[in-house]
């Protein structure tokens, strides 16, 4: 997604400064830095990189400098610079939980952080040796291996038969293959359970571009592992995917990601018309019920159909799939209208890709970094339902029960 370069200037500059310092440290050992300073730089760099990705995905927000904070990593006091944004919604996941001064499982956190910021397992081992921590190499290998094994188990273990929502999206990456780079697509599926918790159900990397046959294998695999009833599936409008999802989950609403649709409008419409389209769509998203939204959607299509008949014709055919989110409680409409839940994983993976030089250095490197991104989410911000989901969970479960009682 294109963004104003001014929006990422502050975090990019901070990340570059910290990156140069860390590179200098790894080249010279501890000559110029203490372990305390190293930990501060690593944590500060992770936070700055996180904010950079957040601002790219949230263009309405702005950077707002940094504030200094003292942390405890084991017995070591560490000073870090914490990035801020103007609206206050951003908080680096690399920090301890709110109101905690230190980290739990400090040694594990250090190894995970080093794995996440290194190009490969071997690069992380080299860094440990230069820091005089060679004894930790075996632990680091164990951590990386366990992440890969857990990722593979995640793609095969049984799934609960009932889900409130299914979020489906793909992400392109590049892998090193000898002296060349080859493309791969990561097929990601996140489920929202009836307990309100999110869980990654499938995370599979396949060589080449995103394609329909791979999506068939991924979605059919969910059914083979036990999934039966889904209330709403959220996905982008990848060619041919919609009828497959409808066929596999006939009683589910299928919501096409409205963010992808809004991006496409900028491609198919003139700049002036695209701006008007965005304003009209914003009004539709704010509709108080589905009937009003349908009426406004038809008005939007009527407004642009003469100038852009082909694209508007496709939108009109899929109206119910762009407006399915309006059936649900207001607090959940934003979550159920986009694939942004999957973007939480993609965002962490993007940070790791940049730290790796723009690509992943092997299949195993990609696997353990995927495992690290997923583990940090499920053991962190996804460990409990957020307040929005929790507040409407009884209503969502009542809707689920009502729908599937009718089809018994």
Image (cartoon, helix red, strand yellow):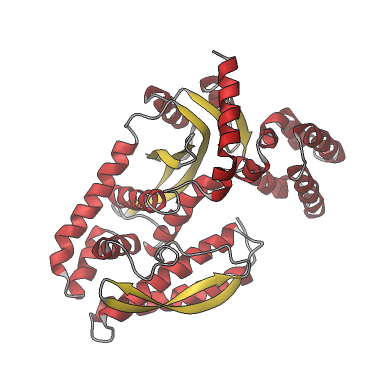
Residue 158, percent from left and from top: 34, 29
Q: Is residue 82 left or right of residue 42?
A: right
Q: Is residue 177 visible?
A: no
Residue 210, percent from left and from top: 48, 38
Q: Is residue 295 visible?
A: yes
Out of 353 and 43, give the one closest to the viewer. Answer: 43
Residue 3, percent from left and from top: 63, 62
Q: Is residue 246 left or right of residue 298?
A: left
User: Looking at the rendering, in which quadrant would you find the C terminus?
Assistant: top right
User: Looking at the rendering, in which quadrant would you find the N terminus?
Assistant: bottom right
Q: Is residue 6 left or right of residue 46?
A: right
Residue at 62 percent across and 34 percent down: it is 255
Place residue 360 in its image quadrant.
bottom left
Residue 161, percent from left and from top: 43, 25
Q: Is residue 386 left or right of residue 362?
A: right
Residue at 66 percent across and 31 percent down: it is 321
Judged from this view, the residue extending furthest toward the top is 408
Is residue 403 depicted above or below 304 in this figure?
Answer: above
Is residue 36 depicted above or below 91 in this figure?
Answer: below
Out of 110 and 144, give the one closest to the viewer. Answer: 110
Residue at 67 percent across and 45 percent down: it is 264
Judged from this view, the residue extending furthest toward the bottom is 32
Count of marks, rendered view: 0
Judged from this view, the residue extending furthest toward the left is 135
Place residue 220 in its image quadrant.
top left
Residue at 68 percent across and 35 percent down: it is 322
């Amino acid at each position: 997604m294109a963004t104003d370069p001014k929006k990422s200037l502050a975090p990019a500059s901070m990340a570059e400064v910290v990156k140069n310092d860390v590179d200098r440290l790894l080249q010279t050992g501890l000559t110029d830095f203490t372990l305390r300073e190293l930990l501060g730089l690593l944590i500060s760099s992770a936070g700055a990189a996180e904010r950079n990705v957040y601002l790219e995905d949230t263009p309405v927000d702005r950077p707002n400098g940094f504030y200094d904070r003292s942390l405890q990593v084991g017995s070591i006091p560490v000073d870090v610079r914490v990035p801020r944004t103007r609206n206050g919604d951003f908080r680096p996941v690399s920090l301890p939980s709110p109101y905690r001064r230190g980290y739990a499982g400090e040694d594990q956190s250090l190894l995970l952080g080093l794995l996440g910021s290194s190009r490969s397992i071997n690069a992380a081992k080299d860094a440990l040796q230069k820091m005089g921590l060679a004894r930790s190499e075996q632990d680091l290998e164990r951590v990386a291996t366990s992440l890969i094994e857990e990722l593979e188990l995640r793609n095969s273990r049984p799934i609960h038969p009932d889900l409130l929502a299914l979020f489906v999206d793909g992400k392109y990456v590049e892998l090193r293959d000898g002296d060349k780079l080859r493309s791969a697509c990561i097929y990601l599926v996140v489920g929202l359970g009836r307990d309100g918790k999110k869980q990654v159900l499938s995370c599979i990397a396949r060589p080449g571009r995103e394609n329909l046959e791979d999506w068939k294998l991924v979605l059919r695999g969910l059914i083979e592992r036990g999934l039966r009833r889904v209330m709403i599936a959220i996905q982008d409008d990848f060619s041919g995917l919609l009828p497959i999802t409808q066929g596999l989950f006939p009683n589910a609403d299928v919501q096409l990601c409205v963010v992808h649709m809004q991006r496409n409008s900028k491609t198919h419409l003139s700049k002036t018309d695209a701006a008007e389209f965005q304003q009209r769509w914003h009004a539709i998203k704010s509709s108080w019920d589905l009937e009003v939204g349908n009426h406004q959607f038809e008005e939007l299509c009527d407004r642009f159909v003469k100038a852009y008949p082909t694209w508007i014709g496709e939108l009109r055919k899929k109206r119910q799939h762009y407006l399915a989110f309006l059936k649900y409680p207001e607090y959940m409409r934003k979550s159920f209208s986009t694939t942004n839940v999957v973007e939480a994983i993609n965002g962490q993976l993007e940070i790791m890709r940049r730290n790796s030089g723009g690509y992943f250095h092997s299949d195993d490197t990609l696997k353990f970094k995927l495992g690290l991104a997923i583990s940090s989410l499920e053991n962190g911000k996804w460990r409990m339902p957020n307040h929005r989901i929790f507040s409407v969970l009884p209503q969502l479960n009542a809707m689920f029960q009502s729908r599937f009682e009718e089809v018994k």
